[in-house]
Image (cartoon, helix red, strand yellow):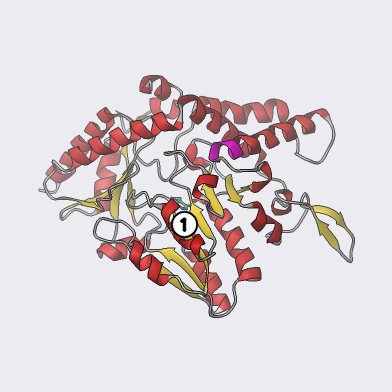
Amino acid sequence: MDIQKIRSDFPILQQKIHGHPLVYLDNSATTQKPQQVIDSIIRFYTSVNANVHRSGHFLSERASVSFESTRQKIQSFIHAKQTEEIIFTSGTTESINLVAHSFKNQFIKSDDEIIISEMEHHSNIVPWQQICKQKNARLKIIPFDEHGELIIDAFKELITEKTKLIALTFVSNALGTINPVKELIHIAHEKNIPVLIDGAQAVQHLPVDVQDLDCDFFVFSGHKMYAGTGVGVLYAKQKWLEKMRPYTYGGGMVKSVSFENTTFANHPFKFEAGTSNISGILSLGKAIDYLNNIGINKIQQHEQRLVTYGLDQLSTLDGLTIYAKPKKRCGIISFNLEDIHHYDAMMILDKLGVAVRSGKHCAEPVMNHYNIKGTIRVSFAMYNTTEEIDRLLVGLQKVQEMHR
Ligand code: PMP
């Protein structure tokens, strides 16, 4: 992997922030975009712009073909069986809400149970919590242990005949833990319980094969994998899409409409009412081309080297606590410096051109587990380097000096 070549594709990385070359270590919040992705958005508005699946004119045909070819790219990227199993949404959050809405209306009744884990992002907590409240159902939580790993025996014990769905994150955005989702899905399927996997922190870092995982639903966001914002994906097995009723109603998702009745289009269109974020979706296609050109396995190896180096370097600092030591970790490290507020550390690092995130990372229950208010989080992408981790270290030393 030629990192310098990759870096030169990302114009934002050439910037200086507060007079220092930018070190961008907030990739779990959103990744930067390569020129190829930025160009695809400009190209769409300069030479293709038209609505899709509506008019038959040249531009509309061209836009529709690119739109559907992006669906195919996503299908092959996550190894879905059929293109029709790929639904475009505005992001992970909307994808989860779509499934939650459908479960609330069709599959959950009073006294039923939904299982999530203690390390979920708020997007994979609140929708389930709210539908449980509305249906008088119960939300059950798989705890994690001192290594930041889910306790599988506790998971097995939580499952009952009332369990209707299990929703789990593949990779924790707050701790970096890679969960053994294939094993967990297998356990759930032995009891015929469907599983939704939140892949928001996985697809850009490791190979994903939804057929091999055998998950029922898989969700992710474009902006965390080098594409534009406001676009995401819901993968669902065909059998679910056939059963699920539409989430939103309007144009583009119907076969025929009268004042008395409406017949709906087949999936995926049944779930894509209104005009989609077409330029965002095409940018996702470009981002997938970009990832494929480099190769997800190479990206994974590079990021693993970064996280190993990062953990080694961070452990040289006195008074630094790293939260979670899972056996399998993606390029995410959460930590705190003794007697220093995470927000203060983030602000000082920012002045040195190092962008990290501080706070609860939309995972408040993880913070409650450790009885802390928040952490400093660094998260890597394919364009990060060990030299940037050295800059982080120098920055953290400075933070400590300033607090002596
Ligand atoms: N799940 C996880 C694990 C995440 O990291 C995020 C984003 N931080 C989300 C869900 C929500 O993603 P989005 O805001 O793109 O909908």
Q: Is residue 10 visible?
A: yes
Q: Is residue 382 visible?
A: no
| Type of amino acid at the residue the image marks with label 1 | His
Q: Nearer the viewer, residue 32 or 117?
A: 117
Q: Nearer the viewer, residue 74 or 124?
A: 74
Disc 1: which residue: 186
- Rendered location of residue 101, percent (x, y): 61, 65
Q: Quadrant of residue 355?
A: top left
Q: Quadrant of residue 42?
A: top right
- Rendered location of residue 4, percent (x, y): 37, 20
Dot 1 falls on a residue whose secondary structure is helix
Q: Which residues are magenta?
A: 74-78
Q: Is residue 179 magenta?
A: no
Depicted 397 relative to depicted 249: above or below: above
Mark 1 Cα shell of 10 Å, populated few (<14), some (14-19), many (≥20): some
Q: Left of 342 or right of it: where is 95?
A: right
The residue that appears at 31% across and 47% down in the rendered structure is 377
- Rendered location of residue 325, percent (x, y): 24, 50
Q: Left of 19 or right of it: where is 199?
A: right
Q: Nearer the viewer, residue 210 or 200?
A: 210
Depicted 118 relative to depicted 38: above or below: below
